[in-house]
Image: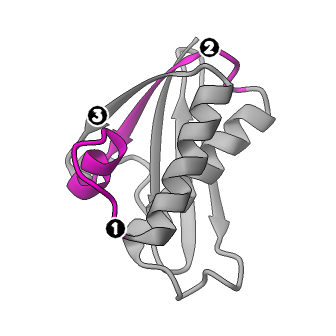
């Protein structure tokens, strides 16, 4: 199945939207106390991507070998996830490992797409 995945995050919360041909799922969460006002916006976006993918798999929206276009509104994040730049932030490096592990374990076909922040329909 084809999916389009949007996500966003800030110092206090995260959100994501998963679009398929049939429906759009909208989710948001407050950060757990250890992250609330302790993470940068970009770190929060990594949390949103990780949690959103994990959630999508857990509720069976995303299944093994599905195709997902991940819409990214941060150029740095796009460069890190597409391996065009080396990550120096340990928090981001760890989240990226978790994200890539999920992708590998579920044999997901991922396409990253850089979009203008105004096009991010999961914007907080």
Mark 1 nearby-residue class (10 Å; few <14, some 14–19, many ≥20) = few
Residue of label 1:
88
Q: Secondary structure at mark 3?
A: strand
CA–CA distance between discs 3 and 2?
19 Å
Q: Tell me how the rendering is colored.
A: one colour
The mark that comes first in sequence, 3 or 2, is: 2
Q: Is residue 24 visible?
A: no
Left or right: residue 9 compared with residue 32: left
Residue 29 image offset from top left, x and y in percent: 66, 64
Residue appearing at x 50%, y 70% in the figure = 91
Residue of label 3:
113
Q: Secondary structure at mark 1?
A: loop
Identify whether 118 is placed above or below 40: above
Tag of residue 21 = none
CA–CA distance between discs 2 and 1?
30 Å
| Range drawn in magenta | 61-88
Frontmost of labels 2 and 1 is: 1
The mark that comes first in sequence, 2 or 1, is: 2
Question: Mark 2 touching mark 1, by CB under 8 A?
Answer: no
Residue of label 2:
65
Residue appearing at x 45%, y 73% in the figure = 10
Report which quarter residue 70 is drawn in.
top left
Frontmost of labels 1 and 3 is: 1
Q: Secondary structure at mark 2?
A: loop
Q: Quadrant of the C terminus?
A: bottom left
The mark that comes first in sequence, 1 or 3, is: 1
Residue 51 image offset from top left, x and y in percent: 64, 52
- Nearer to the camera, 23 or 34: 34
Mark 3 nearby-residue class (10 Å; few <14, some 14–19, many ≥20) = few
């Amino acid at each position: 199945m084809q999916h389009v995945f949007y996500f966003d995050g800030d110092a206090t919360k995260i959100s994501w939207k998963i679009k398929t041909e049939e429906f759009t799922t909208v989710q948001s969460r407050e950060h757990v106390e250890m992250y609330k006002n302790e993470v940068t916006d970009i770190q929060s976006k990594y949390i949103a991507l990780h949690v959103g993918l994990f959630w999508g798999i857990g509720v069976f929206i995303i299944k093994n070998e599905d195709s997902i276009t991940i819409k990214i509104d941060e150029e740095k994040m796009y460069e890190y996830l597409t391996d065009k730049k080396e990550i120096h932030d340990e928090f981001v490096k760890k989240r990226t490992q978790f994200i890539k592990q999920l992708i590998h374990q579920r044999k997901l076909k991922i396409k990253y797409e850089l979009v203008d922040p105004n096009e991010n329909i999961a914007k907080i």
